[in-house]
Image (cartoon, helix red, strand yellow):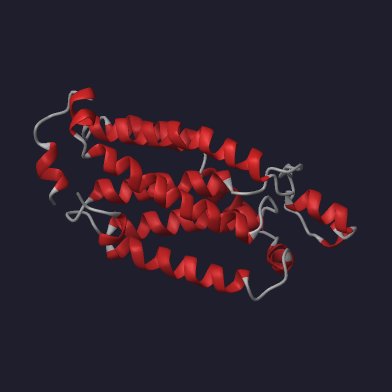
Amino acid sequence: MKGIWENKWFAVPVLIFLVVGTFLLYTIPYGDEILFFNAWRVEPFNTIFRWCTILGEVFVYIALGIAALLWRYRFTVLIALSGLFILPLGYALKDQIAIDRPKTYFEKQGVYGDVVVVPEVKLNSGRTSFPSGHTLSAFTLYSMLSLIAGRKHARWGLLFALLAIAVGISRIFLVQHFLADILAGAVAGLVCAQFIWWLNGRAFFQRMTFLDAGIRKNDER
């Protein structure tokens, strides 16, 4: 049973993202990552990041799950299970940790007027910032796709890593989350994908999903 980190095309950019993000987390004041993008919130970046954030939403799971039916039924099950697993997890974490969203945080600080926002983007408020649900979703999904691609299509891992990272950055750019939120979402997504892939190798899961015998050959790629 292979793991996420065996695909270097996926692992290297993700590790760079996590290392650089963690370094910035401890070297810049909380919230400055939001203000950093003020000068960048113009076209075409506004449109680019609005599209990037969509890549972490539920309809992408649905589209890829349907597409996976053309390849192998098990892959559709894995994608669907990933989506169903992270939904309650994300809500539970947000509810228990209860960190202010950027909009709420800056309003409490009395400096919300210093934040440049992206037009036509509705800012979430309240105490649901940590972790980033979109980033959790994206890293779970694209980590799973990297695992599914296997060694035969390992280079696809680079694209999957960049897509997941782009979703995370988009959440800061769109003033929806802080850096800590997306790093936590990324780590949680990686763990979720690896856990679900571990289930994929269990005998009970194979019997439950009535899968073709050729899956073992794929797992050993």
The residue most toward the front is: 96
Seen at 59% across and 42% down, the residue is 93
In the rendered view, tell whether residue 65 sits above or below residue 3: above
Seen at 27% across and 54% down, the residue is 3
Seen at 87% across and 60% down, the residue is 111
Query: Which of the 4 image quarters holds residue 34?
Result: bottom right
The residue most toward the bottom is: 27
Looking at the picture, how far across and down is residue 221, in whole percent?
13, 52
From the viewer's perspective, tell me whether residue 123 is left or right of residue 78: right
In this orientation, which residue lies closer to the viewer: 118 or 179? 179
Residue 74 is at least partly visible in this image:
yes
Looking at the picture, how far across and down is residue 26, in whole percent?
63, 72
Seen at 76% across and 54% down, the residue is 117
Query: Which of the 4 image quarters holds residue 106?
Result: bottom right
Looking at the picture, how far across and down is residue 178, in whole percent?
66, 57
From the viewer's perspective, tell me whether residue 57 is left or right of residue 130: left
**Numbered disc total:** 0
Looking at the picture, how far across and down is residue 23, in whole percent?
56, 74
Residue 44 is at least partly visible in this image:
no
Query: Which of the 4 image quarters holds residue 35?
Result: bottom right
From the viewer's perspective, tell me whether residue 161 is left or right of residue 72: right
In the rendered view, tell whether residue 71 sits above or below residue 49: above
